[in-house]
Image (cartoon, rainbow, N blue to C red):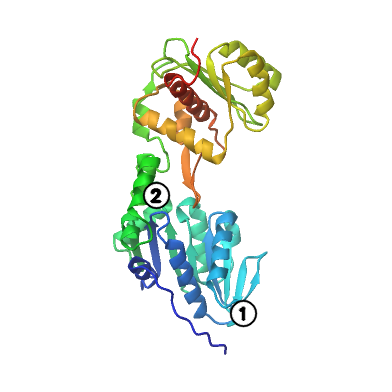
């Protein structure tokens, strides 16, 4: 038998309450950067120390990249290095006691079936499919193993919220925890200044979910269904476009041209798929001398350059994770403050299906898998163009 002398690191009061809970299943909805990952790494390591040779404990996360982050943090946590052997390819740590800590992705949830698991953490669970929970739950059956489910709040339409409701209602073997940014401030993990800055930087619904653990009725939609409905017109608005926003097609996507009038209403809308030559010629005819912002990401760059040789009021826009976040949040504010209006149809449909995810480092905005966000991007560029025009940063004919 191998003996390991272990002293638990200092944790906050709420971290300790969660990992010392006697409940078999705990559901924790927590503010970002509240220390939930650190505390659950501690818990899973302690569970591994209780296991015999060849017995498994798991860390599960929605995608490989998130799993890899936890794997690296667990390796850094276990000191000295001689306490384990690592297999980086399989993300597996075998302790000198023979117990095994494995890090698994929930992306292909069928791969979670089969093993007998003695304890598990399901990280960022609100961003994983419920079928992954079913698979993980099955691995804990024979062992009567414990599981701790953690993540940021993501609306009321996901399985973690429903499971949390059951725990709050007193479901046997379940316990619910909620951590907000205020708890983190009290414990010295985050500062009041950081919270206030985040509140200024983010749309209200995003801040409430990521920092206050308050779910929205709209799930992860950043605009809000009520705001979208309030700013939907029964038909295209009248007037002449004073600016255009254009999202160029890539592979199976659509080229979308949106024009806004002086009041911020969509008065021109096109959505089509053509080859680059036809697309370039059509855009030149459409925008003429009107101020226009066009997506130039990737293959769109030479197309935009060709258009700029003829249309001198055209500006290219490079979509990156950070620039997309900026223009989408400008669109969020414009919709929530009634500064832009759009007709019924595909624009509204894309706005309602659009969502955000928190990667652990930043907010990422996109359409759900298999859907499009071309109209959303074009509308965001048009709103940016209208704002630049109003602040006189562009020449107005």
Residue 89 falls in which quadrant of the image?
Answer: bottom right
Residue 296 falls in which quadrant of the image?
Answer: top right
Tell me, yes or no, if residue 113 can be seen here: no
Looking at the image, is mark 2 or mark 1 earlier in the sequence?
Answer: 1
What kind of element bears circle 2?
helix
Identified at 52% across, 76% down, the residue is 48
Tell me, yes or no, if residue 44 can be seen here: yes
What kind of element bears circle 1?
helix
For disc 2, the marked residue is 210
Q: CA distance from mark 2 to mark 1?
A: 38 Å
In the image, residue 186 sits, relative to residue 95, either above or below, namely above
In the image, residue 354 sits, relative to residue 98, either above or below, namely above
Residue 248 falls in which quadrant of the image?
Answer: top right
Identified at 45% across, 52% down, the residue is 126
Q: Between residues 74 and 219, which one lies in front from this camera angle?
A: 74
How many circles with numbers are drawn on the protein?
2
Q: Position of residue 155 (x, y in %)?
A: 38, 46
Identified at 61% across, 14% down, the residue is 311
Q: Residues within 10 Å of mark 2 (few under 14, many from 20)?
A: many
Q: Which mark is residue 82?
A: 1
């Amino acid at each position: 038998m191998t003996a390991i002398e272990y002293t638990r690191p200092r944790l906050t009061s709420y971290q300790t309450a969660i990992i010392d809970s006697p409940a078999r299943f705990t559901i924790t909805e927590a503010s970002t950067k509240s220390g939930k990952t650190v505390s659950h790494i501690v818990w899973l390591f302690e569970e591994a120390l209780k296991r015999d040779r060849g017995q498994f404990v798991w860390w599960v996360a929605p995608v490989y990249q998130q799993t890899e982050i936890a794997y690296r943090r667990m390796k850094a946590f276990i000191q000295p290095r001689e306490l384990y052997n690592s297999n980086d390819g399989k993300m597996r740590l075998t302790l000198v006691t023979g117990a095994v800590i494995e890090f698994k992705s929930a992306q292909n949830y069928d791969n979670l079936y089969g093993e007998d698991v003695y304890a598990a953490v399901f990280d960022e669970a609100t961003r994983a499919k419920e079928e992954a929970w079913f698979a993980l739950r099955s691995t804990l059956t024979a062992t009567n193993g414990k599981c701790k489910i953690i993540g940021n709040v993501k609306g009321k339409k996901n399985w973690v919220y429903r499971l949390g409701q059951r725990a709050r209602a007193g479901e046997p073997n379940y316990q619910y925890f909620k951590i907000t940014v205020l708890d983190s401030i009290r414990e010295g993990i985050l500062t009041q200044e950081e919270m206030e800055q985040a509140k200024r930087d983010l749309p209200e619904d995003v801040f409430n979910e990521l920092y206050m653990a308050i779910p929205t009725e709209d799930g992860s939609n950043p605009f809000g269904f009520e705001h979208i409905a309030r700013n939907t017109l029964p038909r295209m608005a009248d007037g002449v476009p004073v600016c255009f926003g254009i999202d160029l097609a890539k592979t199976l996507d659509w080229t979308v041209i949106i024009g806004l009038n002086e009041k911020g209403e969509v008065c021109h809308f096109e959505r089509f798929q053509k080859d680059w030559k036809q697309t370039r010629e059509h855009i030149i005819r459409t925008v003429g001398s009107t101020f226009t912002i066009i997506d130039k990401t990737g293959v769109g760059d030479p197309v935009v350059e060709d258009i700029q040789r003829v249309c001198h009021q055209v500006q290219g826009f490079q979509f990156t994770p950070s620039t997309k976040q900026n223009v989408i949040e400008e669109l969020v504010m414009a919709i929530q403050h009634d500064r832009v209006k759009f007709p019924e149809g595909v624009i509204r449909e894309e706005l309602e299906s659009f969502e955000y995810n928190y990667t652990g480092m930043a907010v990422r905005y996109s359409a759900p898998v298999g859907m499009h966000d071309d109209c959303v991007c074009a509308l965001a560029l048009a709103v940016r163009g209208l704002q630049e025009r109003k602040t006189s940063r562009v020449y107005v004919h």
